[in-house]
Amino acid sequence: MRKKIVAGNWKMNNNLNETIKLIDDLKNEISSVDVKIMIAPSFPFLRKAVKQIDDFGIEVISQNVNDNDSGAFTGEVSAKMLKSIGVNTTLIGHSERRAFYNEEDSLLLKKIKHAIENKMNVIFCFGEELSDRKSDNHFDVVKNQLDSTVMKLEKDLWKKIILAYEPVWAIGTGETASADQAQEIHEFVRGCISKRFGSVISNNVSILYGGSVKPSNAAEIFSKKDVDGGLIGGAALNAIDFSKIIEANR
Ligand code: PGA
């Protein structure tokens, strides 16, 4: 059966001391649960976070990865570097990477393949913009994003993939997709995967929802049958809120 997951994307927040404090607070707040918990601090603090978490049961993941092994790519971080410090999962395709750093599907596919070749797991993010939803194109946009990326993967690579549906209009805006809107897209995506790769893969892939998930709306969103958890931004920066969201996914 597919895993329930709650992942915190800390984005470009927290210095070293704040990172250490938030991890300490999380260790105090979170009781053992059968939900997989992940946090994505900034690159400079990943090694420290891995050591600090130790065997507590939170996976430390990265927010991004380059698509090359090594070389003249100033400012970039490779999968091999991440693996060497104990980071085994990365986000790829977050809408902020797409919007601010012009990361397009062709590059994202290279990143996905490269990460998996290096034995990393991938949380692949996708989702429509407000204009797509207003013009009723959200299903097509989502399908195109998937068709040009993960749908091109070989079948046996899917065990390394987690998906995160993040409608851009709901990220950091306080505007949340309703639980029904999330379910509708998750079900559609699972159906597309089933058509292409069969029901075993489509039933086993975890599909997370992201976009203004809070303690007050998490339980309703997570109660939907095709929503396997959340990718949490703002609310992941507060240990109490994040642990309440984890509890909501039991
Ligand atoms: P948000 O961010 O929870 O602050 O909306 C979600 C995300 O960007 O992953």
Image (cartoon, rainbow, N blue to C red):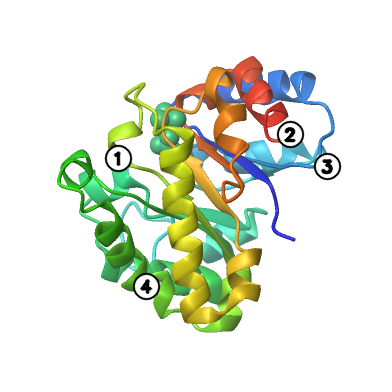
Visible residue check, residue 12 = no
Q: Amino acid at mark 2?
A: Gln
Q: Nearer the viewer, residue 219 or 148?
A: 219
Q: Quick check: 29 above or below 197?
A: above
Residue at position x 25%, y 58% in the image: 141
Label number found at residue 168? 1
How far apart marks 2 and 1 lie (CA) works out to 33 Å
Residue at position x 55%, y 39% in the image: 230
Q: Position of residue 3 (x, y in %)?
A: 70, 53
Q: Nearer the viewer, mark 2 or mark 1?
A: 1
Label number found at residue 55? 3
Question: How many other residues sit within 10 Å of disc 2, few (<14), some (14-19) or many (≥20)?
Answer: some
Which residue is labeled 4 in the image? 110
How far apart marks 1 and 3 lie (CA) works out to 34 Å
Q: Amino acid at mark 3?
A: Asp
Residue at position x 74%, y 41% in the image: 35
Q: Amino acid at mark 1?
A: Val
The answer to whether 150 appears left or right of 198 in the picture is left
Question: How many other residues sit within 10 Å of disc 4, few (<14), some (14-19) or many (≥20)?
Answer: some
Q: Nearer the viewer, mark 4 or mark 2?
A: 4
Q: Position of residue 237 (x, y in %)?
A: 53, 22
How far apart marks 2 and 3 lie (CA) works out to 9 Å
Hey, which quadrant is residue 173 in on the image? top left
Q: Which label's residue is closer to the chain start, 3 or 4?
A: 3
Q: Quadrant of the N terminus?
A: bottom right
